[in-house]
Image (spheres, rainbow, N blue to C red):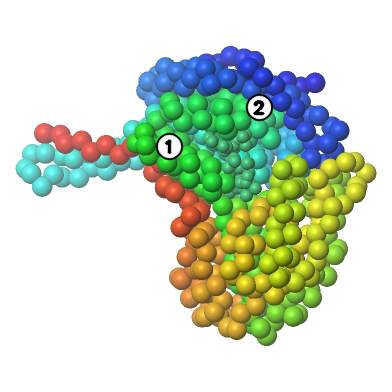
Amino acid sequence: MTQYKNLIAGEWVAGASEADNINPSDTNDIIGRASHASAAQVSDAIAAARAALPKWNAGTSQLRSDLLAAIANELFARKEELGELLAREEGKTRAEAIGEVGRAANIFRFFSSEVVRIRGEKLASVRPGIDVEITRDPVGVVGIITPWNFPIAIPAWKIAPALAFGNTVVFKPSELTPGTAHALAEVIHRAGVPAGVFNLVLGTGAVVGDALLSGVDAITFTGSVKTGNQIVRRATERMIRVQAEMGGKNPLVVLDDANLDVAVGCALDGSFFQTGQRCTASSRLVVTEGIHDRFVDALATRLAQINIGPALKAGTQVGPVVDRRQLEQDLRYIDIGSSEGASVRVKGELLKRETPGHYLSPTLFTDTTNQMRINREEVFGPVAAVIRVKDYDEALAVANDTSFGLSAGICTTSQKYARHFQQHAEAGLTMLNLATAGLDYHVPFGGRKGSSYGPREQGTYAIDFYTIVKTSYLSV
Ligand SMILES: NC(=O)C1=CN([C@@H]2O[C@H](COP(=O)(O)OP(=O)(O)OC[C@H]3O[C@@H](n4cnc5c(N)ncnc54)[C@H](OP(=O)(O)O)[C@@H]3O)[C@@H](O)[C@H]2O)C=CC1
Ligand SMILES: O=C(O)CCC(=O)C(=O)O
């Protein structure tokens, strides 16, 4: 049985307790055992990261660039093998998982180049004989807390810029995906990242996440709104830098003039692929009257054809729900939608497959209002609700009537509405004739309102979170 240990100060160490890593496609398949760190071990990891900081920061940018490139190269070379591990423990399909490992590799490669592009500014002072230089220092020890739904891409887009800009790291992955996190830590360690610069601590949010918050200089988090809000409050009490990417209740607006095939394709992908377990998933389908019935019929037909099965089986388009707790949440919301008076056009059913797993078919609600709980709260499963609207103006108002603001999509052939939506959707991302989910690795990512707190992640914008600006006055 594979054992996943913690990486603290360059050593692989056993923790205080253990937990099974269970395959959601086959709950009899125990993939490995994770050794959960104690709170004291988390403090050791923070101390190791702090001790390693001065030397890492003073090292050359070439060294940091070479190390990040070496990590990228190994991820590219092993993307099939690591993708299979990821699919086995998280439940997304083999193709999705391999694609995610490739995405992580590209992120490390991107930041290996960013290291040598860190620039400052030099200005003349308003006073004579003085120059002003603006440079960037690392923030210090960065705590990284990640969810299970992108178990290598999200860690990559936090770890790579943290290391690139001279910080040291203590990384706490989701307890549901320790295998991928451990494999990534091995790659980082093997690349030659010095002891203490990168530390892995496995375990639950209640123990490990909590201990992490008390010692680091900055914390970056992705996950639920509830946990994100707690973390932001804790971090601001300590006056440390914090970045939280949380949920979404993302609208996909479909206008009468949309290309029907495109719109149905966007809904299918954005709402149901990856089992709906994406913060960018389009769980609200806001559809104008003239296309409503045709759209719903065509989407229901496509939903009936989706192949749901074990993540690693050839031909599977949608894998299982990640675990029993998430499955129970999905089923609870399906009941809530029905009890709120929504019509159930396609009813989600528990499915039996060749192995015992958390298989759930899609649910499509119609005749819903934007005030229903299924349209206000994040479900995080293969569940979407159609909201019928009169015209574009009502569609935009409904799209924006939410406490979230991560992604917003529109399907239309009208340039006028497309442009207006891009300008007026209250979201961090807008998508035209594209699914609300699915991101590039080199551009900023983040939301508005309750979806995000703090500066943007990814691309050249990541530097704003991972560095502190210094203004130096020089008498010349
Ligand atoms: N926006 C997004 O990308 C995501 C949203 N979600 C939403 O969150 C719901 C629950 O999923 P879940 O994975 O439990 O999400 P959480 O927000 O609870 O977990 C995200 C990460 O935070 C950790 N964590 C939990 N509690 C604390 C704490 N008190 N202090 C520090 N860290 C903590 C978790 O640890 P651990 O789980 O190991 O205990 C995990 O590593 C989903 O149903 C979905 O609605 C989930 C995943 C991603
Ligand atoms: O849509 C994507 O590709 C990324 C979504 C994401 O970051 C998330 O669900 O946490």
Say whether residue 104 is left or right of residue 272. left
Q: Quadrant of residue 256?
A: bottom right
Number of labels in the image equals 2
**Are the residues flagged by discs 1 and 2 in contact, CB closer than 8 Å?**
no
Q: Is residue 65 visible?
A: no
Residue type, numbered disc 2 = His
Q: In x, y percent, where is residue 171?
A: 55, 30
Taking depth in this image into account, of 402 and 64 the one nearest to the observer is 402
Are there few (<14), some (14-19), or many (20+) residues within 10 Å of tag 2?
many
Taking depth in this image into account, of 104 and 284 the one nearest to the observer is 284
Residue type, numbered disc 1 = Arg
- Please name the residue shown 47% across and 39% down the image: 231
Task: Mark 1 or mark 2: name the one nearer the start of the chain.
Answer: 2
- Please name the residue shown 81% across and 63% down the image: 347
Quadrant position of the C terminus in the picture: top left
Are there few (<14), some (14-19), or many (20+) residues within 10 Å of tag 1?
some
The numbered mark at residue 182 is: 2
Quadrant position of the N terminus in the picture: top right
Q: Is residue 244 above or below residue 14?
A: below
The numbered mark at residue 234 is: 1
